[in-house]
């Protein structure tokens, strides 16, 4: 007896996700986070309160840095430019000041985010939880915010510690004339974008009992998606006063990112 050939077109394999398409999906998830302002305006506007408080603190620290920037540049340049001609020493001080500002802005972005998440943990827990419920929730225990706050805060502090350590090579790169002033901001955005994705997904990951070490492992498997989400957050956070609006939207986008990497619906 001959084998029966099945009729109809052969089954097609699911489309393969490329790094480029995943990166664009990450950008799209952040856009959806901003779209949540229209769907949950009251909830997201509440999230502006801790963001504004954290911004005032970080802005004050940055202004202090700018006040003493000239002295810092002269002090650091004195380590290696002592004995140079006046023009060469002045040029060295300008390069050092630029590197300090680049490094400070980079640290500002992630430190600000971590501080905002610590201050506003109950608010952002509510934002993330409401979005999860609207999309169908999930099979995980829902813990009250006062149970998750210590773990969320500890994870954010560890992310900031990583950022401070990584700031050193970025700062050194920024000291390289001309090339450093281009490459250092780019490298800062890439590393900062990755760390922001790790930090901004902390609340929904912790809700699932998946903490920092495992969260990093999961996001590494979706690196392009995480970078597509985090790099625009880092870039937008460099715009003066934009952080206050960006962070609540990024919390919403981080919740959608978490659901996507867990294979849960985001529509």
Image (tube, grey):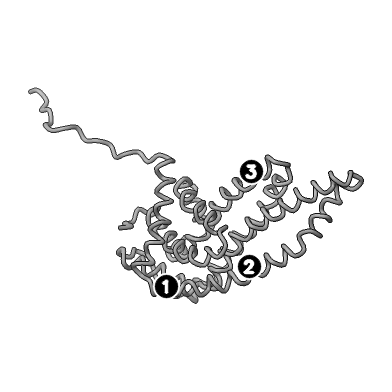
Residue 85, position as x, y percentages in the image? 89, 44
Q: Give the residue displayed 47% in from the left and 72% down from the top.
A: 47
Q: Sequence order check: which comes first, mark 1 or mark 3?
A: 1
Residue in the picture at 67% in, 64% down: 62
Choose the circle earlier in sequence order: 2 or 1. Answer: 2
Q: In the displayed structure, would residue 48 be above or below residue 236?
A: below
Helix, strand or loop under label 2: helix
217 or 168: nearer the eye?
A: 168
At x 81%, y 53%, the residue is: 76
Q: Are marks 2 and 1 in contact (CB under 8 Å)?
A: no
Task: Say which mark, if any, is on residue 126.
Answer: 1
Quadrant in the picture for residue 195: bottom right
Which residue is situated farthest in the right direction here? 83
| Place of residue 252 in the rendered image (x, y in percent of width and height, measured from the top left) | 42, 63
**Mark 2, mark 1: which one is toward the viewer?**
2
- Structural distance between the alpha carbons of marks 2 and 3: 25 Å
For mark 2, does the 10 Å Cα neighbourhood hold few (<14), some (14 to 19), or many (20 or more) residues? some
Measured in 3D between alpha carbons, the distance from the residue under mark 2 to the one under mark 1, in whole angstroms, is: 24 Å
SS of the residue under disc 1: helix
For numbered disc 3, what is the local secondary structure?
Answer: helix
In this view, the residue in front, 124 or 77, is 77
User: Most extreme residue toward the front, as rendered?
Assistant: 87
Q: Quadrant of residue 109?
A: bottom right
Image quadrant where residue 31 sits: bottom left
Horizontal side of residue 265 vs 2, given as left or right? right
**Which marked residue is nearer to the observer: mark 2 or mark 3?**
3
Q: Which residue is mark 3?
A: 182
Q: Is residue 13 left or right of residue 121?
A: left
Q: Nearer the viewer, mark 1 or mark 3?
A: 3
Q: Which residue is label 2 attached to?
A: 58
Of marks 2 and 3, which one's residue comes earlier in the chain? Answer: 2
């Amino acid at each position: 007896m001959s084998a029966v050939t099945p009729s109809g077109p052969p089954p097609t394999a699911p489309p393969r996700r490329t790094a480029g398409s995943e990166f664009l999906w990450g950008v799209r998830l952040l856009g959806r986070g901003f779209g949540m302002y229209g769907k949950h305006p009251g909830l997201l506007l509440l999230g502006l309160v801790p963001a504004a408080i954290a911004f005032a603190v970080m802005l004050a620290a940055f202004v202090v840095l700018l006040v003493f920037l000239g002295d810092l540049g002269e002090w650091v340049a004195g380590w290696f430019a002592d004995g140079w001609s006046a023009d060469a020493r002045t040029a060295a001080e300008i390069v050092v000041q630029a590197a300090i500002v680049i490094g400070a802005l980079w640290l500002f972005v992630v430190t600000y985010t971590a501080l905002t998440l610590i201050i506003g943990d109950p608010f952002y827990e509510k934002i993330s939880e409401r979005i999860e419920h609207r999309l169908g929730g999930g099979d995980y225990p829902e813990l009250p915010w006062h149970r998750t706050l210590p773990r969320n805060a500890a994870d954010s502090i560890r992310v900031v510690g990583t950022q401070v350590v990584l700031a050193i090579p970025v700062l050194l790169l920024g000291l390289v004339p001309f090339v450093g002033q281009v490459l250092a901001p780019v490298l800062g955005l890439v590393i900062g974008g990755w760390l922001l994705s790790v930090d901004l997904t902390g609340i929904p990951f912790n809700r699932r009992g998946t903490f920092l070490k495992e969260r990093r492992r999961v996001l590494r498997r979706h690196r392009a998606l995480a970078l597509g989400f985090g790099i625009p957050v880092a870039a937008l956070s460099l715009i003066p006063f934009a952080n206050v609006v960006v962070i609540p939207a990024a919390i919403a986008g981080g919740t959608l990112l978490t659901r996507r990497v867990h294979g849960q619906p985001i529509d």
